[in-house]
Image (tube, grey):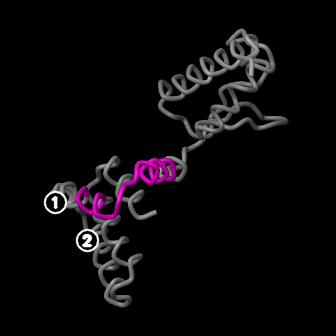
Amino acid sequence: MSVDPEAARTGKRAAQIARCIEAEIVRRGWPIGASLGSEAALQQRYGASRSVLREAVRLVEHHQVARMRRGPNGGLIVCAPDAGPATRAVVIYLEYRGTTLDDLLDARLVLEPLAAALAAEQIDEAGIERLRAVLSAEQQRPGLPAARDEFHVALAQQSKTLCYSCLSKSRCD
């Protein structure tokens, strides 16, 4: 199977533009709801053809960084990313690598005491109430994995460590 050199160049250029758009969003402080410009303005800014720009926009949309809104007041609009797809990607990767439940529990044994220590240092009244509610719900449904998992996710959230919170949630999915 041969590769069309023009298509390869187009794809590479689209990926470069997508990275530039994403970098601009980060540089601007991730202004949710802000327009980065119309399709025509973006074509001009990046010196790209319509097809290359549309491919770049598809990449940015796939990364859930922005979405193209058509019509008046349209343009490429910055949006809040959803951790769900990244979480699913981690789960798929771990499954592919043959990660076992014991592997996940070993990771939890290493990381969770650190998360608990951080949570203890930073927790506020709302966080305490959240943990109490989760523990109460777990007591209502003893032995159910979802109830146990919810406690670990809530504890990770109270540690205020975003990376650990995402990892904790991905272990439960």
Give the side of residue 90 with respect to residue 100, left or right: right
Of 71 and 19, nearer the camera is 19
Quarter where residue 5 is shown: top right
Of 84 and 31, nearer the camera is 84
Which percent across, then down, holds residue 17?
63, 18
Residue found 83% across the figure and 35% down from its top: 72
Residue found 34% across the figure and 47% down from its top: 163
> As displayed, is residue 69 above or below residue 94?
above
Give the side of residue 151 with respect to residue 67, left or right: left
Q: Residue furthest right?
A: 71
Of 70 and 100, nearer the camera is 100
Which percent across, then down, holds residue 103?
29, 58
Binning the other alpha carbons within 10 Å of mark 2 as few (below 14), some (14 to 19) or many (20 upward) gives some
Binning the other alpha carbons within 10 Å of mark 1 as few (below 14), some (14 to 19) or many (20 upward) gives few
> As displayed, is residue 74 above or below residue 139?
above
Q: Mark 2 or mark 1: which comes first in sequence? A: 1
Magenta highlight on residue 54: no
> As displayed, is residue 57 above or below residue 86?
above
Could you say whether the residue bearing mark 1 is in a helix, strand or loop? helix
Residue found 34% across the figure and 85% down from its top: 143
> As displayed, is residue 158 above or below residue 68?
below
Badge 2 amino acid: Ile
According to the picture, the residue beneath numbered tag 2 turns out to be 128
- Which labelled disc corresponds to residue 158? none
Could you say whether the residue bearing mark 2 is in a helix, strand or loop? helix
Which percent across, then down, holds residue 127?
29, 67
Magenta highlight on residue 96: yes
According to the picture, the residue beneath numbered tag 1 turns out to be 113
Query: What stretch of residues is rendered in magenta?
Result: 88-107
Residue found 55% across the figure and 27% down from its top: 22
